Image: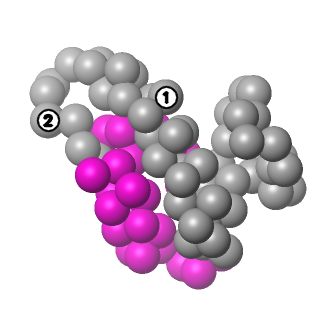
Amino acid sequence: MLERAILDLLDRRAPTATICPSDAARAVYTGDDDGWRALMEPARRAARRLAAAGEVEITQAGRPVRTSHPHGPVRIRRR
């Protein structure tokens, strides 16, 4: 579900655009409160799975992240 949300969000943006994992978390969360925050780590894991499959690239400060568990804010873009 989160993988699909990530890909759908990227499909609606320019080819070089990025999204935050929170964008995907918010896209799948159906509540009106801040419950999407509980989906942040699952969204980051979904991004890592997509990166391992060669679908996306995870970046920090505009540069690709080479670690499987980056610390701090990340962005996701099409590979």
Q: How many marks can you see?
A: 2
Q: Is residue 76 above or below residue 23?
A: below
Q: For label 2, count other residues whose C-alpha is less than 10 Å away and answer few (under 14), some (14-19) or many (20+).
A: few
Residue at 84 percent of width and 50 percent of height:
66
Report how far apart the C-alphas of labels 1 and 2 lie in the structure: 17 Å
Q: Quadrant of residue 52?
A: bottom right
Quarter of the image for the C terminus: give it: bottom right
Q: Residue sitting at 33 percent across and 57 percent down? A: 5
Asked which secondary structure carries label 2, the reply is loop
User: How would you classify the magenta stretch by its main secondary structure?
Assistant: helix
Q: Residue 44: horizontal and vertical position, in percent?
A: 53, 39
User: In this picture, which residue range is highlighted in magenta?
Assistant: 1-26
The residue wearing badge 2 is 30
44 or 27, nearer to the observer:
44
**Which amino acid type is shown beneath numbered disc 2?**
Thr
Q: Is residue 52 visible?
A: yes
Label 1 sits on what residue type? Glu
**Pointer 1: what residue?**
41
The answer to whether 31 is drawn above or below residue 23 in the figure is above
